[in-house]
Image: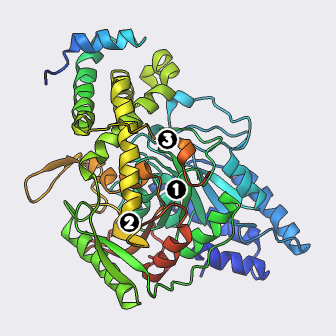
Amino acid sequence: MRPHELTLAAASRAVGARELSPVELLDSVLTRLEEVEPRLNAYVTVTADRARAAARQAERDIAAGTLRGPLHGMPMALKDMVDVAGLPTSGSSRVRAGHRADADSAVAARLTGAGAVLVGKTHTHEFAYGLITPQTANVRDAGRIAGGSSGGSAVAVAAGTAAFALGTDTGGSIRVPAALNGVVGLKPTYDLVPRDGVVPLSWSLDHVGPLTRTVEDAALVLPALTGGEPSAVDGDVAGLRVGVPRNYYFDHVDPEVETVVRRAIERLESLGARLVEVEIPMTRYVQAVQWGLMVPEATAYHERTLRTAPELYAADVRVLLEAGELLSAGDHLRARRARTLLRREWLRMLEQVDVIAAPAVPMTAVPAGQETVTWPDGTTESVSDAYVRLSAPANITGVPALTVPVGTDRAGLPIGLQLLGRPLAESLLLRAGRACERPLTLAGS
Amino acid sequence: MSSLTPGEAARWAARAGLSLPNDRHAVVAATADHIHSVVSVLRELDLGDTAPFHAGETDATA
């Protein structure tokens, strides 16, 4: 096995035991990157020289007996919305040409402090305002979308060109690409991971979190981001109350996705979990609240550049930002007030169960260029709306949500199970996720 | 509900301080209409005394 094929946890154990040096690990990752990156295009910038220097320093520190922790010497990728001092934060946008960050974001500083080695910055749908990431190819089928907006981060992890990555999630932007490329994605509780130095899309919905190959890997990255204690991820789900939605999460879902997800839920039951049917509240208002918050917030953030350089935005993003100028303050406030109700109802529902288990997305990765999906009842939905649909509730309510790969469809495309829990229940989600994950082998060759 | 005309979209954008070129009026009007149709569903709710959610109520900082 080549070092880049190791999971983060396995690589970390090998480095800690001095069986593998951070330099060997990085060399393997950079060789892999040369092999697959021309086809996948996950990275905006590769910082190879800087990474080699950091890996050599990690090697010296560890040889001298100073192991900082499980991320020391581990190659990472950061979504190009995350500031790293001295590097551009492009947001994968021409608007940001010439940008250079003055300081590290809080998360970049914490990960650097933990000894992680930056391989580079990964592509996002422009300014995280979309679900496609058109620059990047799906790791399992280059003719299909990577998903977004953290598409580059998901593909880098799935291809073995980073041991772990960070993404941001405003309406599914960690979980959607994680599910579509067959990796683990964690959207933590709102405000648990600091957003300082991360380009916002919508302040009140934005979250920062890890993308990894396994649940065990995610459990290693989370404490480095939060400063909290590591979680035990032993996969023990005996007695766990698992909520299975009777509405919303299995409506307008591809039958193959539903079958694989329900099989994963049955695995939880066979391991001792108790399944409890739950009714998801206020589903009619999810999209309205999501848009009523996100659209004006995104327009507000981009106010200045929308006036000085509108032609530099991609067409899909530009028109949303422009139309956002026309949404009234009354509509925005109504969304904020409805959010209070929606969150209250969700917390009430979550008193009945420990976690909720559901599909991460309604369908696997669609071919690049496909704009709509038509469901068996004749309903047509935009691809972006479909991918956001099952993600947005966790952004609106702020509850943690984890997606784990649990299988593939007949075409070999990954399917993700989403686990949601009460605020700050990340360790419970990781435990349940560990019990039913089916990690996929590296792809992208 | 009547839809926004391209001219109205341009006027409303101008009031917000955004001058839209002529070739943007129709597409912005159509997109704003769509957003409006999605968000207007919230008018069904009786929000009573409900205050807007604000980040200070979040769990991680509580």
Q: Which residue is mark 3?
A: A204
Are discs 2 and 3 less than 8 Å apart at CB? no
* Residue situated in front as seen by the camera: A419 or A159: A419
Residue A235 location in percent, x, y?
51, 83
**Amino acid on which the number 1 mark rests in the picture:** Ser
Query: Residue sitting at 27 percent across and 55 percent down?
Result: A367
Mark 2 highlights which residue? A140
Tag 1 subunit = A
Q: Give the foreground label among 2 and 1.
A: 1
- Extreme residue toward the right, this view: A64
Quickly name the residue at label 1: A153
Asked if the residue under mark 1 is in contact with the one under mark 3, i.e. CB atoms within 8 Å, the reply is no
Q: Is residue B1 above or below residue B13?
A: below
Residue B18 visible somewhere in the drawing = yes
Q: Are marks 3 and 1 on the same chain?
A: yes
**Circle 3 Cα neighbour tier, 10 Å, few/some/many (<14 / 14–19 / ≥20):** many
Q: SS of the residue at dot 1?
A: helix
Q: Picture coordinates of residue A104 (x, y %)? A: 72, 43
Label whose residue precedes the other's in the sequence (3 or 1)? 1
